[in-house]
Image (tube, rainbow, N blue to C red):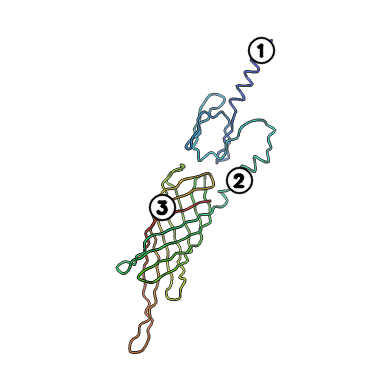
Amino acid sequence: MKKGLFLIVFCIMCASYAYAETLLLRTGARVKGSIVFENNEVVVIRDAEGARFQYPRAEVVEIIADEADTSDASDAKTAEEENDSPKKASILLEIAGGAAVIPNDAAGGAFGIDLLVGSHLIGGLHLFIGGGIGYHGLFLGGAKYNFLPIQVALRMPFVETRHAPLFGVSLGYGVALSKNYLGGIYAGIDFGYRYQVNPKTAISVVGFAQFQQATISTVETIEESEFINRTGRNFVTPGVKMAVYF
């Protein structure tokens, strides 16, 4: 009798050990088992049959401790919805600084701030696609040129890991903020590094190059008569950019 009772208790303990945790994945799947190893990169879990499975840490939305079936289902659903929120919308804030050049003409400095809204999680990948506006200031030859770029943007990591190289492109139109010059096509390209802090937040540091068209108006006086001369200019801005996804 005692031996049979011992076996029953032992089996219950083994079952509870085998299903000590549940991994909630980005795909919506749930994997039950016992975690045998985890770090910032991977989570290794063993199921009831002893088979081991490895998942990238970035794909694990939540690790749920299995205590009892009487847990509040509504709380679990709310937590899942909160962790899935990057699928709905994400904000990208970028701050940039560097040089400004008009080829074969003038050189100076530049800074910029861009605020973009879009999706940071598409198809299980931390791929940002969105659009927004910014403010760019260029200082060249004693003159200041300010633009308001209206743009669409793509920011894509090369691999889906916590640490990843990043590629980005932007395209739009830079609206001039002065009557002395007109705006034009705006384009940018980024290469750098991205760190995924958690499912909702990431930071990146990249090198970039931007291109801005403009038409500059100057007044010339010839024999006491004034003439307006409009000249097309291409501003090229290389530099460094820091960004936060949230």
Label 2 vs label 3, nearer the camera: 3
Marks 2 & 1, CB-CB < 8 Å contact: no
- Residue found at x 67% / y 14%: 5
Classify residue 30 as left or right of residue 239: right
x then y, percent, for residue 237:
38, 62
Disc 2, SS: helix
Please determine whether, in this image, residue 65 is positioned above or below residue 101.
Answer: above
Mark 3 and mark 1: Cα distance apart in space: 65 Å
Element type where label 1 sits in the image = helix
Seen in the image, is 24 located left or right of residue 202? right
Residue 206 badge = 3
Point out the tag, 3 or 1, that comes first from the N-terminus. 1
Instruction: Provide the residue designation for mark 2.
Output: 82
Residue type pointed to by label 1: Gly
Q: Nearer the viewer, residue 103 or 48?
A: 103
Mark closest to the chain's N terminus, 2 or 1: 1
Mark 3 burial class by Cα count in 10 Å: few <14, some 14-19, many 20+: many
Q: Residue 19 appears in which quarter of the rendering?
A: top right
Residue 236, percent from left and from top: 36, 63
Q: Amino acid at mark 3?
A: Val
Front disc: 3 or 1? 3
> Toward the viewer: 97 or 215?
97
The three-letter amino acid code for the residue at tag 2 is: Glu
Q: Dot 1 corresponds to which residue? A: 4
Q: Nearer the viewer, residue 206 or 212?
A: 206
Q: Say which label, 2 or 3, has the lower sequence index.
A: 2
Query: Looking at this view, is 51 or 17 the one in front?
Result: 17
| x, y percent for residue 105 | 31, 69
Query: Which structural element holds mark 3?
Result: strand
Outermost residue to the bottom: 224
The residue that appears at 61% across and 45% down in the rendered structure is 82
